[in-house]
Image: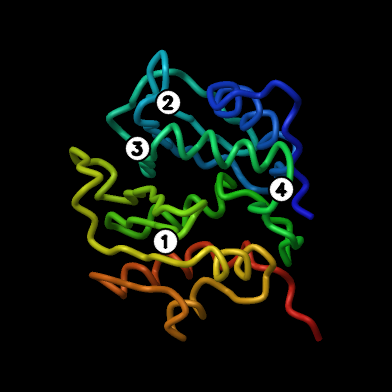
Amino acid sequence: MFPFEIPPGTTVRSLVTQVFPETHAKLVPKAAGSDAFTIVLALEGLEGGGSFTADVKGNTVTVREEEARQRQVWVCARAEDAERFLGDWSGAKRFVPKFAPGGNLVLMSDPRILKRLAMVSGKIELALADFEGERVAMTVALGAAAKKTIDPEDADVTVEATVAVFEELLAGKIAPEDAIAEGRVTVKGNKLLAMQLALAVAPLAPAKKK
C-alpha cells in the first residue's frame, strides 16, 4: 500500500498546503538532490480561491496561495473532483497505488521525476471516462508549454482510461507506457507526447519480479 496517510479533517486546501509538503519531506530523500522546480496547481471552483504554487527544492516544498508565472509543471482540475478523490483517499483508498515503487522514488514531486517531466513539452488531458458515472479530467502542461498562457480546453493530446484500467495501473499490473502501446487507453492527438509523459514517470513503477 502507498505510504500516504490523510489526517482526519483534511480539506482540499490543507491537503495542498500542509499534507503535501509534510509528505514530501518525509518520503523524498536528501539524495534526490537540490534542483529547484515550480509547480502551479489551479483548482477551478475552490471556495476562497484555488491557485497554488509549490516551490520544490530537494526534499523541501513551500506552498503559497498564488499562481507563479515561471513554472515547469502546471496542473488544472475541478475542485469538486479533487474533493471526491480526497474522500476516497481518506476512506476506502480505492484510488491510491497498491504497490511500492522499485527504487527510492515514491512521489511525483521528487526532483528526479520533476527533472524528467520538465524535459517534456506539451499539454496533456488525463481523463477517466466512468468515474462514479461521469467523465472527470485534469490538464497538465509541462516544460515550455507550462510557461505559456494556459487554456485547459486546448490540450495537445487526451489520454482517457476506464476506471477498471486505472485500477490496474494503481495495482502495478500494467505500466502507463504499456497501456498506451497496447491500446488499453484511448489516445486522441499527439501520441508521442503521451508516451513521453508515461516514460517520464516510469521510475515510479513497481519493482519487476525476477
Say what secondary structure mark 1 lies in.
strand
Q: CA distance from mark 1 to mark 4?
A: 19 Å
Give the quarter of the figure containing the C terminus.
bottom right
Of 32 and 11, the residue lying toward us: 11
At 24% across and 55% down in the image, what residue appears?
A: 155
Relative placement, left or right, of 117 versus 29 is: left
Considering only vertical position in the picture, is 14 above or below 105?
A: above
At 70% across and 41% down in the image, what residue appears?
A: 30
Eye-nearest disc, 4 or 3: 4
Q: Which mark identifies residue 129?
A: 1
Q: Which mark identifies residue 71?
A: 3
Give the residue at mark 4.
Answer: 93
At 72% across and 33% down in the image, what residue appears?
A: 6
Q: Which mark identifies residue 52?
A: 2
Of 94 and 103, the residue lying toward us: 94
Q: Residues within 10 Å of mark 4 (few under 14, many from 20)?
A: some
Which is more N-terminal, label 3 or label 4? 3
- The kind of residue tagged 3 is Arg
Q: CA distance from mark 3 to mark 1?
A: 29 Å
Relative placement, left or right, of 53 versus 144 is: right
Disc 1 vs disc 2: Cβ atoms closer than 8 Å? Answer: no
Disc 4 vs disc 2: Cβ atoms closer than 8 Å? Answer: no
- The kind of residue tagged 1 is Ala
- The kind of residue tagged 2 is Phe
Relative placement, left or right, of 129 versus 89 is: left
Eye-nearest disc, 1 or 4: 1
Q: Residues within 10 Å of mark 1 (few under 14, many from 20)?
A: some
Q: Residue furthest front?
A: 133
Eye-nearest disc, 3 or 1: 1
- What x and y, as percent, mark residue 77? 39, 40
Which is more N-terminal, label 4 or label 1? 4
